[in-house]
Amino acid sequence: MTIHIDAEKGDIAPTVLMPGDPYRAKWAAETYLENPRCINQVRGMLGFTGTWHGHDVTIQGSGMGMPSLSIYANELISDYDVQTLVRVGSCGGMQENVGIRDVILAMSASSIATPSGSIFREFNFAPCADFALLVAAEKAAREKGVTTHVGSIYSSDTFYDERPDLNEQMTRHGILGVEMEAAELYNLAARHGRRALAVLTVSDHLITHEALPAEDRERSFGDMIEIALQAAFA
Ligand SMILES: O=P(O)(O)O[C@H]1O[C@H](CO)[C@@H](O)[C@H]1O
Ligand SMILES: O=c1cc[nH]c(=O)[nH]1
């Protein structure tokens, strides 16, 4: 047990999917896992463990933003010895050719700041995905016929952003989408020698201003869950 996760050590699998939304964790576990059981309820940050095609897997909510993700990822890595962490999140599209419900595989994650900034200080570390996970996810997405983009994303500390000039520069530099956790997940995986990937679904668009409702973000992003599971156990 840790401060934020009240599971016993053996209750958490070496492979963990991490949605920001704890209710997406519940929906994904009940939809895709066999014999899912709730292993964490502390602060309502639900976690479930079950099996997928015979493989043990945990789906644990991370909360929103890098400080929250950092708490759960640190405890999963240091206290539960988790080896593979795959974020399954929503994101905002930042390119004209990136559509609502498209999947983005985050090869790298830029940021203005992360919780690891105090360690790196003047060093601009480039957080990137585990290559084998990335390749396996791209293959799984291609085989499913899901419209998928592989490239760089932006991990932001703010959802309600007031820097249109910065968004313009990111779009100009090929950033595919914006979310709020992947950069710190990649930092932690690099520091501890673990595998990490962010598989994202576009839930709204910064250029077209289309947006899906909360229920869709919670319960309808099945393609990214299947892609994440297939990549984790490829
Ligand atoms: O849908 P999740 O996984 O929570 O991800 C995105 O949605 C939240 C903002 O609405 C942030 O956590 C952002 O990263
Ligand atoms: O962080 C996020 C997540 C979804 N959509 C956004 O615009 N930003």
Image (cartoon, grey):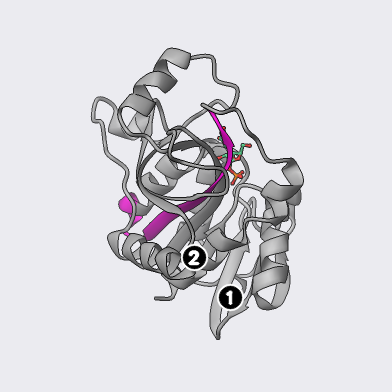
On the rendered structure, is 140 left or right of 9? left
> Which amino acid, by three-letter code, is at mark 1?
Gly
Q: Mark 2 points at which residue?
A: 227
Question: Which quarter of the image is occupied by the C terminus?
Answer: bottom left
Up the image or down, 229 lies above or below 119; here it is below
> Which amino acid, by three-letter code, is at mark 2?
Ile
Q: Name the residue under label 1.
A: 10
Q: Which type of secondary structure does the marked residue at label 2 adopt?
A: helix
Residue 127, x across and y down, in percent: 32, 43
> Mark 2 Cα within 10 Å, few/some/many (few <14, many 20+)?
many
Mark 1 or 2, which is nearer the eye? Answer: 2
Residue 28, x across and y down, in percent: 66, 64
Queried whether the magenta region covers residue 196, the answer comes back as: yes
Count of numbered marks? 2
Note whether residue 143 is visible: yes
Closer to the camera, 104 or 3?
A: 104
Q: Give the range drawn in magenta.
A: 190-206
Give the CA separation, mark 1 to mark 2.
25 Å
On the rendered structure, is 30 left or right of 132? right
Queried whether the magenta region covers residue 192, the answer comes back as: yes
Q: Which type of secondary structure does the marked residue at label 1 adopt?
A: helix
Q: Which residue is drawn at 43% across and 54% down?
A: 148
Secondary structure mostly seen in the magenta stretch: strand
Q: Which residue is drawn at 29% across and 27% down?
A: 121
Q: Which residue is drawn at 37% across and 62% down?
A: 138
Up the image or down, 99 lies above or below 10; here it is above
Note whether residue 45 is visible: no
